[in-house]
Amino acid sequence: MRGIEWILFTLAVVTIGCIRVGPDYSEPYVPTQDSWTEELPVDDIDLGRWWENYHDDTLNALIEYALADNYSLDAAAYRIIAARANLGFAIGELFPQTQQGEGSLLRTQFSANAPNTINASRHFWDSILGLRIAWELDFWGRFTRGVQAAYGEYVASQEDFQDIQRILISDIVLAYVQQKTFQKRIAVLERNIAIQHRSVEIALTRWQGGYESELDYAQAVSLWKETIAQQVNLEIDLKRVTTTIATLLGLTPEALLCTFNLEDRPIHTPSNATIAYPAQILCQRPDLRRTSALLFAQCARVGIAISDLFPRISFTGFLGVECAGDTRSTANQGVKHLLSGNSLTFFYGPDFVWPILNYCRLENRVIEQYAILEVGIADYRNQVLQAYKEIEDALTFYVKSQEETANLEDSFKHAKRSVDISTLQYQEGLADYTRVLNSLQLQVAAEDNLAQAEGNIGLAYAFIFRSLGAL
């Protein structure tokens, strides 16, 4: 067998016979549960476009705009591009790492006092033109593990993009529901402020008429002004949640109000929710999938660290032409000599590099990568537990908010009736103003609590789908 054929045969056998040192990734054990503690319908559900269950065109438009213009999503998209390019680079490492054309034209003059130059030419041109190749073989799977690590990071970047989408959508829904709740609570206070103002007028009339003391009038004014102050605080909260929506959409607050109609309109609160089976959250939540992909990448890095303990086997070679001529040679003669058969030069062959006496640096690097892998596994298990906690908390929030709303509806109905009765009795002189004052306070608290509870149902619904991993 000729030399070049022997080399190619050896390369084929070595490449095919490569092994991968280090552990192969397997999904770590994570704690799971079989059912949810709250009684809600459980089924395989579609997690797409869940926000449309609020039946609000403005909310839908806000989300569509944010998905197109949010800066965090833009950054995540570019991270995907970078990770994909890194994966392409890692795949390229499986092939000859050096494939380059080389050429030089050097004018050389040796010293007359240098050794062995008595009969040698000391003035000449040296021309070289050729192709150099260097190929470190993936004998221990070092480059294959590098591809695995890059692939894990690429998948993680995709999952990160989806996780940002998940959080962005739910944050917009939560902020929008809060905005509608604040608007409703402000409207509630405005109605009660009007009622309390009427009560102030009644107390003033009876005081001026000599039927009651100034105390009733002072108490009526105090309650009236206190309710106005509550409205001011809610208006501050409303402003804050509006600017939050603007930031999520990548807009200034002014541009948001010019682009979208955020007027006080009621929002439909979903009253029924179907949830997924507990085990499905491992494949539904993009943050868990991202962590799993990063564990896959870290497992590959352990293999890379182990491969550094073994020799690196390479094949190197050069094929080209070289010609040297004295300074009196013409350019044509130089080209002619360079391209002649006698100018052919080449070399090829295997070589290896094996780090020895590294004073446990490489061994400790292996220990370090193993430890990082174990840290990631522990964090992943905690992340799964946190996901279960988020879902359970959201389910409880949803169920109990519905129960709270039902009770507060009855509370408000009776509080409103007590205001009507106590006000009428006060006008007729059958009751003092303390009873009116207490009734008014109960009505404000009951109606405001009812508005908050109804808003909580909408918030809890969003928390459920956010925790389930819906996009």
Image (tube, rainbow, N blue to C red):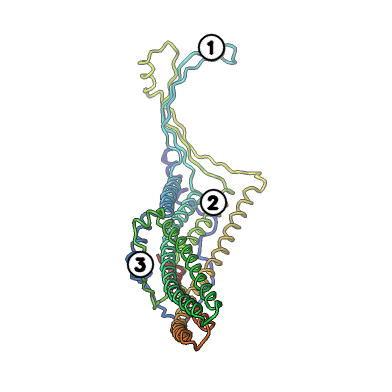
Q: Nearer the viewer, residue 178 or 316?
A: 178
Disc 2 on helix, strand or loop? helix
Instruction: Pick whichever of labels 3 and 1 is earlier in the sequence.
Output: 3
Depth-wise, is mark 2 or mark 3 nearer the camera?
3
Q: Can you see residue 34?
A: no
Instruction: Please tell me which residue is depicted at 35% across the width and 71% down the height of the picture.
Output: 53
Instruction: Pick whichever of labels 2 and 3 is earlier in the sequence.
Output: 3
* Image location (x, y in percent) of residue 452: 46, 74
Mark 2 and mark 1: span between their CA atoms? Answer: 54 Å
Instruction: Please tell me which residue is depicted at 45% across the width and 55% down the height of the picture.
Output: 157
Q: 364 above or below 38?
A: above
* Image location (x, y in percent) of residue 235: 46, 64
Q: Which residue is mark 1?
A: 119
Q: Amino acid at mark 1?
A: Asn
Characterize the local packing of mark 2: few (<14), some (14-19) or many (20 or more) Cα atoms within 10 angstroms: many
Disc 1 on helix, strand or loop? loop
Left or right placement of residue 149 versus residue 330 in this view: right
Mark 3 and mark 1: span between their CA atoms? Answer: 88 Å
Q: Nearer the viewer, residue 288 or 18?
A: 288
Characterize the local packing of mark 3: few (<14), some (14-19) or many (20 or more) Cα atoms within 10 angstroms: few
Tell me the quadrant of the picture where the C terminus can be found: bottom left
Q: Nearer the viewer, residue 277 or 250?
A: 250
